[in-house]
């Protein structure tokens, strides 16, 4: 069978795998998806995204690129349109990795192996399955831009590179990684003694400048207001360590898959020692730039590992080719008809099983009917101006499903007094002192508390410690997964 | 453009109010309102405005604005002349001038009444004179900068030092000696050496101040810096010939960390280098025409974007009409001896519009107890204890407190944090004025 047919098969399988899980529920697996959904609805109704959100943080300005909302708004009219489109988009990574692998090796099995790895890297499943995330578009764009850069000698790919970079820069700050990766490419080329064409140097310069101006335009206000914290998305100090944590090999192994790391590692080793092609250099530069950003903790850990996973998957093509070549030199060559398919099967088994587990975990995060029932109760019973206290991770549920004001959510950029709010909210759910809790209620005008199984896990509390005071709190809705309390005294 | 687009009738800036107030009165060594009475560092600018307004017969505000416009035009022409003399091509001189005029520092300098406007022109004149080998005019221009305060004098002295050390010529020694003497005399009169900021230097804040795109009100434009890097590369071909430019940029950049006004003097250098950068980009034989055009487009768009967003920010800059109204109310409702407590950035407005004594203002040059006042300010704004507050109130004889929304955002977490708690519940504090963003409290004794 021709290799492109096989790759198309893998692509379709990845799409079906994702759609199979995602269609199990009409809900989404993270609260940020609901924020994006709210913007999409706004685009559909008013032809504009939300600039000032009166509900988030009880009123705040929004920042960031709105391109994703405008891309997804037309498909949202089709039932499950967003779920299917995002599945297809992220699955294109399979095709892009295959094309990139073709630039690295001529071994067709290796190309297909690389494509399959990128489709089933556990962390990609975890980060993008059943979530509306800009990464579903930004990641394929990033790697397609890199592929176009490799093939840039042909004018067609140059134009594609410019177009892809432009969309990526407007869509997501991941474009900064593209620009810094290309800058690293120049450095590595100089070290390796590889001649970089003048055209490529020009393109790199343009990319750096273009990405700078776009990101500056989009995030200027954030830099002015949040200062250097804007780099860390203004994430509260207490949880910054979770988002921007140290590189731990164990985490990378688990989240990207052992096979990806082993084969990718062999490929990377070859890139350093023997192979010095531009394709190798391009992906090595991306890996190096990502690792550096992760090392200095200026990149979200999960995002960084996801990118490493995809880049390593591409490099794995070379690793696979060299491993099978080496085996041919050994006695194992006698069983060559068994060994190659066995390796392929082993690779798939070590990826598909963890991916399946990750997919199930991602689906378990989706809003349950019971949680939705509680949130809809708030929507129907609470006054429009009332503020609902919920964990930041559930903040968007309050503004999007219950359509009421929250104290805070995970949209940290430009948010007012982020650290104080985070600490106050933690205090609200964990303090044993009703008096201290009342200070928080007073400060943020809290009228209702949303307390779900997720909140219990986040704060490690089976119930709110002071909530039994019936003079001050009344349970107004209770389901299996969530409870809503009304605050009577502040 | 800023003045046309501005929705408020009030002049922009903080220092503007200091000079307009000084221009309205006869010159005295002591300023009764600033820091509730102090010796101020000598600056001839208010006197020039006063002379031009025929001792106050014509509105000083109008005269000051006209003067700044004229200074802006003269600065532009002088800068154009310098670059033209250096490069001998009109195109580059024109480009450099456009970049200079579009820079946030230039916009800020000539829409506010600023002590650095005259000295910048004088420094450029001295440079132009040196290029035309007119040492006497260069010396005179440099000496004149010392009349506009200590900071311009220091910048002149630095420029002279760099020139003398690198060129090994003593042509400017006279200016150097006179400026040095003026600085020492002023310090001796005020019995302090306080010139630079006392607050610890933080990398992030410094970067934000130095870059307009990160919020610096007269910082450098990132795209001008990128173009200037190309200019640097261009000049590197004859690096020994241009060492004076490299050293000046390095020295001014380091100085601007401590004295941010130095950015005004760094801007023309960056603009000239940026123009050379554009020339360098145009000179390169680009392999891909599309990329060449797009790169230039991106850089020019970046420059324009940066400038226009700065203009937009300036149009809504404080003080607003609302602030002016509240301070006029304070003027009507308080005694002449009243002492008003507020943030350091509001001091000049209090003394100029309300015509009352302030506890402190941003003109901190040669103020002896600035550190102490800073500590007292922090103590008073942070405390919820009436006894602690009383100590500071009595120390400075504070009779009124003026607060605005910006101060609340900057200093307090909520309406009951620190001093705000006392102002709400303390019986000694009486709210006498409140608008959407401002409030005035009277301290009852």
Image: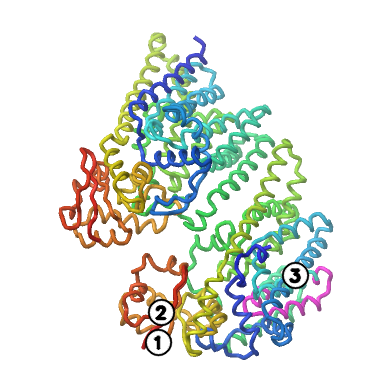
Q: Earlier in the sequence, mark 2 or mark 1?
A: 2
Query: Going from the N terminus, do you reach mark 3 or mark 2 first?
Result: 3
Task: Report the magenta residues as a range.
Answer: B129-156
Determine the chain carrying the residue at label 2: B
Q: Picture quarter containing residue A401?
A: top left
Q: Residue at x 38, y 47 (%)?
A: A410
Name which residue lies at 31% across and 75% down. B425
Do residues under tags 2 and 1 come within 8 Å of each other at their CB atoms?
A: yes
Real-space Cα distance between discs 3 and 2?
Answer: 41 Å
Pick the residue in front: B326 or A292.
Answer: B326
Please tell me whether mark 1 sits on a helix, a strand or a loop.
helix
Judged by depth in the image, the label closer to the viewer, 3 or 2, is 2
* Camera-side residue of B231 and A243: A243
Q: Mark 1 — on which chain does it sit?
A: B
Q: Which residue in the protein does label 1 denote?
A: B395
User: x, y (%) of residue A446?
Assistant: 30, 56
Mark carried by residue B376: 2
Q: Chain of mark 3?
A: B
Q: Position of residue B407 (x, y in %)?
A: 45, 69
Q: CA distance from mark 2 to mark 1?
A: 9 Å
Coordinates of residue B111 in the picture (x, y in percent): 66, 69
């Amino acid at each position: 069978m021709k290799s492109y047919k096989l790759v198309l098969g893998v692509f379709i399988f990845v799409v079906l795998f994702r759609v199979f899980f995602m269609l199990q529920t009409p809900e989404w697996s993270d609260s940020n998806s609901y924020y994006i959904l709210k913007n999409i609805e706004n685009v559909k109704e008013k032809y504009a995204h939300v600039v000032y959100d009166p509900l988030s943080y009880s009123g705040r300005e929004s920042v960031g690129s709105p391109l994703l909302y405008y891309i997804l708004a037309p498909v949202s009219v089709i039932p499950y349109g967003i779920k299917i489109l995002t599945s297809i988009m992220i699955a294109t990574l399979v095709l892009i990795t295959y094309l990139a692998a073709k630039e690295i090796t001529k071994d067709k099995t290796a190309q297909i192996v690389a494509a399959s790895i990128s489709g089933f890297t556990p962390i990609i499943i975890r980060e993008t399955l059943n979530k509306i995330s800009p990464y579903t578009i930004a990641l394929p764009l990033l790697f397609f831009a890199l592929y176009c850069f490799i093939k840039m000698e042909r004018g067609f790919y140059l134009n594609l590179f410019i177009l892809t970079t432009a969309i990526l820069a407007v869509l997501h700050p991941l474009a900064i990684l593209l620009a810094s990766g290309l800058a690293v490419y120049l450095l590595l080329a100089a070290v390796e003694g590889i001649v970089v064409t003048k055209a490529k140097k020009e393109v790199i310069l343009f990319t750096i400048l273009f990405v700078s101006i776009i990101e500056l335009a989009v995030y200027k206000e954030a830099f002015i207001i949040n200062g250097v914290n804007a780099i860390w998305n203004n994430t509260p100090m207490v949880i910054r360590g979770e988002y921007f944590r140290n590189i731990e090999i164990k985490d990378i192994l688990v989240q990207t898959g052992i096979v990806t790391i082993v084969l990718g590692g062999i490929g990377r080793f070859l890139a350093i020692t023997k192979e010095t092609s531009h394709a190798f250099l391009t992906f090595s530069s991306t890996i190096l730039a990502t690792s550096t950003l992760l090392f200095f903790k200026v990149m979200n850990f999960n995002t960084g590992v996801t990118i490493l996973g995809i880049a390593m998957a591409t490099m794995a093509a070379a690793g696979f080719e060299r491993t099978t070549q080496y085996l041919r030199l050994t006695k194992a060559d006698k069983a060559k008809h068994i060994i190659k398919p066995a390796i392929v099967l082993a690779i798939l088994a070590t990826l598909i099983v963890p991916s399946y587990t990750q997919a199930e975990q991602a689906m378990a995060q989706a809003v349950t009917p019971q949680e939705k029932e509680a949130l809809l109760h708030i929507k129907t019973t609470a006054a429009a101006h009332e503020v609902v206290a919920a964990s930041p991770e559930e903040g968007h549920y309050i503004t999007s499903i219950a359509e009421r004001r929250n104290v805070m959510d995970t949209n940290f950029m430009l948010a007012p007094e982020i650290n104080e709010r985070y600490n106050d909210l933690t205090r609200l759910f964990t303090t044993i002192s009703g008096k201290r809790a009342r200070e928080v209620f007073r400060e943020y005008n809290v009228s209702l508390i949303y307390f779900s199984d997720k909140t219990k896990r986040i704060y490690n509390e089976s119930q709110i410690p002071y909530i039994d005071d019936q003079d001050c709190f009344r349970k107004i809705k209770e389901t299996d997964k969530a409870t809503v309390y009304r605050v009577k005294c502040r | 453009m800023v003045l046309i687009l501005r929705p408020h009738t009030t002049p922009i800036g903080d220092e503007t109010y200091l000079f307009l107030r000084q221009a309205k009165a006869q010159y005295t060594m002591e300023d009764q309102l600033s820091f509730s009475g102090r010796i101020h560092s000598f600056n001839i600018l208010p006197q020039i405005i006063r002379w031009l307004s025929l001792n106050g017969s014509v509105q000083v505000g109008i005269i000051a604005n006209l003067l700044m416009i004229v200074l802006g035009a003269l600065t532009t022409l002088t800068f154009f002349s310098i670059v033209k003399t250096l490069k001998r091509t009109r195109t580059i001189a024109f480009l450099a001038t456009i970049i200079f005029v579009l820079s946030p520092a230039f916009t800020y300098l000539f829409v506010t009444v600023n002590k650095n406007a005259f000295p910048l022109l004088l420094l450029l004149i001295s440079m132009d004179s040196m290029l035309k080998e007119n040492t006497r005019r260069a010396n005179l221009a440099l000496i004149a900068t010392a009349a506009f305060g200590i900071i311009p004098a220091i910048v002149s002295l630095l420029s002279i030092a760099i020139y003398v050390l690198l060129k090994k010529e003593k042509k400017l020694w006279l200016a150097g000696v006179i400026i040095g003497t003026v600085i020492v005399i002023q310090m001796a009169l005020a019995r302090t050496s306080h010139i630079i900021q006392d607050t610890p230097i933080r990398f992030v804040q410094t970067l934000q101040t130095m870059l307009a795109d990160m919020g610096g009100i007269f910082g450098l434009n990132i795209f001008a810096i990128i173009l200037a890097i190309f200019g640097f590369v261009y000049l590197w071909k004859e690096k020994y010939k241009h060492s004076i430019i490299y050293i000046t940029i390095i020295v001014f950049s380091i100085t601007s960390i401590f004295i941010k006004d130095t950015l005004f003097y760094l801007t023309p250098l960056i603009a000239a280098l940026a123009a050379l950068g554009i020339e360098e980009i145009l000179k390169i034989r680009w392999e891909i025409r599309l990329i060449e055009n797009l790169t230039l487009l991106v850089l020019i768009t970046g420059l324009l974007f940066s400038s226009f967003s700065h203009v937009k920010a300036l149009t809504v800059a404080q003080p607003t009409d609302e602030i002016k109204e509240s301070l006029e109310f304070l003027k009507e409702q308080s005694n002449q001896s009243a002492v008003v407590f507020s943030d350091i950035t509001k001091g000049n407005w209090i003394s100029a519009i309300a015509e009352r004594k302030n506890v402190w203002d941003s003109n901190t040059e040669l103020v002896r107890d600035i550190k102490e006042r800073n500590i007292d300010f922090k103590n008073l704004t942070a405390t919820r204890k009436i006894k602690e507050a009383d100590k500071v109130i009595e120390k400075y004889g504070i009779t009124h407190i003026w607060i605005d929304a910006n101060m609340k955002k900057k200093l307090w977490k909520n309406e009951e944090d620190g001093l705000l708690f006392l102002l709400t519940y303390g019986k000694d504090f009486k709210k006498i004025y409140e608008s959407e963003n401002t409030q005035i409290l009277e301290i009852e004794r």
